[in-house]
Amino acid sequence: MSVNMDKWCEIAKSNMVKRPQGEGRLAGKITIVTGAAQGFGKGIAEELYKEGASVVIADMNEPLAKEVAASLGDRAIAIAVNVSDEESVANMVAQTVEKFGGLDIMLSNAGVVRSGPIAQMERKDFDFVTNVNYTGFFLCAKYAAMIMQAEHEADKNAMFDIITLNSKSGLEGSNKNFAYAGSKFGGIGLTQSFALELCEYNIKVNAICPGNYLDGPLWMDPEKGLFVQYLKAGKVEGAKTVADVRKYYESKVPMNRGCLPLDIARAVVYCVEQEYETGQAIPVTGGQVMLN
């Protein structure tokens, strides 16, 4: 590991009294959003920026991330990251501290899906999902916690947040989508465990479990999108077209629509503003999945 995290922890610690101020519910909050060049991540980052946060658009697609950051303004920067690579994650956190002086919110949003029947799933695809969705959350939480623990030493009253964008598939099984669901179930286990360990440092760790963003690239991509994957996998019985698959998923939501980035951003703001809940998995599913 070539990144000297001790150096960046000391810098973040020393900057706790120099935090930028501004307007909005998240004014002065330094935030990383992984997978923020498109989809849920982009929409969430845009909403958090509107609320006054300084935002890192972290993504493997650096050119697209730079476009998003430029469209937001001077409180946004783009950083290339592969969340499944430890040095890449450490470098992302170090660059964030270098630019903004610290870290208040780590939103682990980057995620991938590979679906299909168990007998047809290749090991490489299973590992790919696990490395990004599960191991990636661990790595993001690990390096965020290092900085936040140092900051806690400087200000015992400051609150910090590690949030994973999980899924309703982390709350119930998903037919022919076990690699994804398994990684998300595991992510909730990490959330609860991290929450117990980090509570003493005023670091809250929560998961947000959205319903389906049916208008996002994860679903809509014409080659790799979930509508196409699920149609090919035969996940929706009787479906002949992508439109049939979409109609089926819309019909499962009592609120009669898919989840939107604004819905998730509101849940993120709730997580940050409240000071009492940690280790929670918060559904934002339009009533499709309800906690018992």
Image (tube, grey):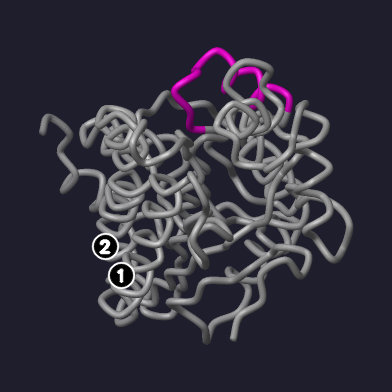
Q: In which quadrant of the rendered image does the N terminus lie?
A: top left
Q: Main secondary structure of the magenta part?
A: helix
Decide if residue 269 is on the left or right side of residue 127: right
Which mark is first along the chain, 2 or 1?
Answer: 2
Decide if residue 66 is on the left or right side of residue 184: right
Q: Mark 1 points at which residue?
A: 194
Quarter of the image where one finds residue 213: top right
Q: Nearer the viewer, residue 80 or 213?
A: 213
Residue 127 percent location from the top left of the image: 27, 36
- Tell me the kind of residue under disc 2: Ala
Residue drawn at x 67%, y 46% as measured from the top left: 44
Q: Magenta residues, as a range?
A: 58-71
Residue 232 percent location from the top left of the image: 59, 26
Q: Vertically, is 124 above or below 274? A: above
Residue drawn at x 32%, y 32% as measured from the top left: 128
Q: Which numbered tag is attached to residue 150? A: 2
